[in-house]
Amino acid sequence: MRIGVIGGGAWGTALAQVAAHGGREVLLWAREAEVVASITDEHVNRSFLGGVALSPSIRATGELGELDAVDAFLVVAPAQHVGAVLAETPVRGRPLVLCAKGIEAGSRRLVGEVARAAHPDAAVAVLSGPTFAHEVAQGLPTAVTLACEDAGLRARLAERLASPHFRPYASSDVIGAEIGGAVKNVLAIGCGVVEGAGLGQNARAALIARGFAEMTRFGLARGARAETLAGLSGLGDLVLTCSSTSSRNFSLGVGLGQGRAASALLADRRTVAEGAFTAPVLAQAAVEAGVDMPVTEAVCRLLDGAEVEAVIGDLLARPLRDEVA
Ligand SMILES: NC(=O)C1=CN([C@@H]2O[C@H](COP(=O)(O)OP(=O)(O)OC[C@H]3O[C@@H](n4cnc5c(N)ncnc54)[C@H](O)[C@@H]3O)[C@@H](O)[C@H]2O)C=CC1
Ligand SMILES: O=C(CO)COP(=O)(O)O
């Protein structure tokens, strides 16, 4: 199975490295000419994944049309751009493995819905889990959820992507895998705020647990399975992203917790913090689904510039309730 990777950011590059395991050829499309040049000439991606020597069997291109030669696509553009990029890709019914984590602003569609609308004849799979790109690219041990409704296809994809360091666990719960990855980015911003404002480890653990309750309520309302939300792509990724400044979402939250404005923090970076785009859309989707998501609402207020002390105070002053509702 020849793999094409759509997106030359940190995660697309790391996944190209995974797919190139054993010297297999991989074609990676990158939007930036300097990324194409750096991978082609030096086998590195200086712009988004510096310091990692890439397999020479990864070939880079700036032309989406060249992807016509592959058998399956790993779709690794940021969630807000997946629709536009897929509209230009010659998919022609070949499988789309979605690796972005987010919800499209405006339409409030999960990435799977975006992909199905663009290419109704292509099978859709979701690859998601606790996966910092720089660790994966260095070959450190990693496990992911690989969700696809077609059992034969998910087995073929899992076999094609597995390596001694990269272990996909198969699942049929596509929506569950998507929701875990999208929601955890928002919660990671909240955990970063806790860190940045010096609110302590107890508060961070409480936010992870209550955030997971929110993820579960929202996921179940949208048809996800509880086991998926408690697995690699849900709780696993939530714990990773809420614990480390390697996370762009957590780091954004640290800055907010230190009193800096979201607009200034986002203007400073070239890399994507998906939670900043997903938070307001998720809050709206939660209202539509009749699901209470107070941590997500708090993150939205913080992104909009509210004072940390006021937002945390309001969260703690909510009426007392049962832990399991
Ligand atoms: N970096 C990581 O460790 C992981 C990232 N992801 C997800 O992968 C997705 C991609 O993230 P990264 O590779 O980390 O990106 P990145 O932050 O390393 O790089 C930004 C990417 O956005 C692309 N981009 C910017 N404007 C664009 C536009 N108008 N159209 C198309 N592409 C555009 C750039 O070409 C670049 O590929 C995100 O949804 C992220 O949540 C998932 C797992 C791990
Ligand atoms: O999704 C990720 C790890 O699984 C990467 O998290 P950030 O996007 O917050 O860096």
Image (cartoon, helix red, strand yellow):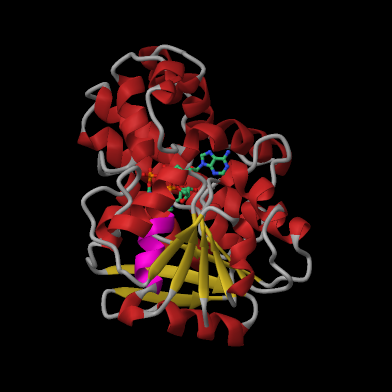
Q: What is the residue that sits farthest to the bottom in this orientation?
A: 152
Q: Is residue 190 above or below residue 26?
A: above
Identified at 52% across, 46% down, the residue is 31
Predominant SS along the magenta part? helix
Q: Is residue 194 magenta?
A: no
- Asked if residue 205 is positioned above or below residue 219 in the image, the reply reads above
In this view, the residue in front, 319 or 72, is 72
Count of picture labels = 0
**Residue occupying the point 37% across, 16% down:** 308
- Name the foreground residue: 1 vs 150: 1
Which image quarter: residue 104?
Answer: top right
Residue 181: x %, y % from top left: 48, 52
Along the line of sight, which residue is nearer the eye, 158 or 66? 66
Q: Position of residue 191 (x, y in %)?
A: 34, 35
Q: Is residue 108 above or below residue 266?
A: below
Q: Position of residue 288 (x, y in %)?
A: 73, 39
Question: In the figure, residue 18 lies in which quadrant?
Answer: bottom left
Residue 73 visible (yes or no): yes
Question: Image point 31% across, 69% down: which residue?
Answer: 56
Relative to the observer, which residue lies in front, 75 or 90?
90
| Residue 220, picture quadrant | bottom right
In the displayed orientation, state which residue is furthest to the front.
41
At horizontal 71% and vertical 70% (from top left) the residue drawn is 122
Q: Magenta region: which residues?
A: 12-19
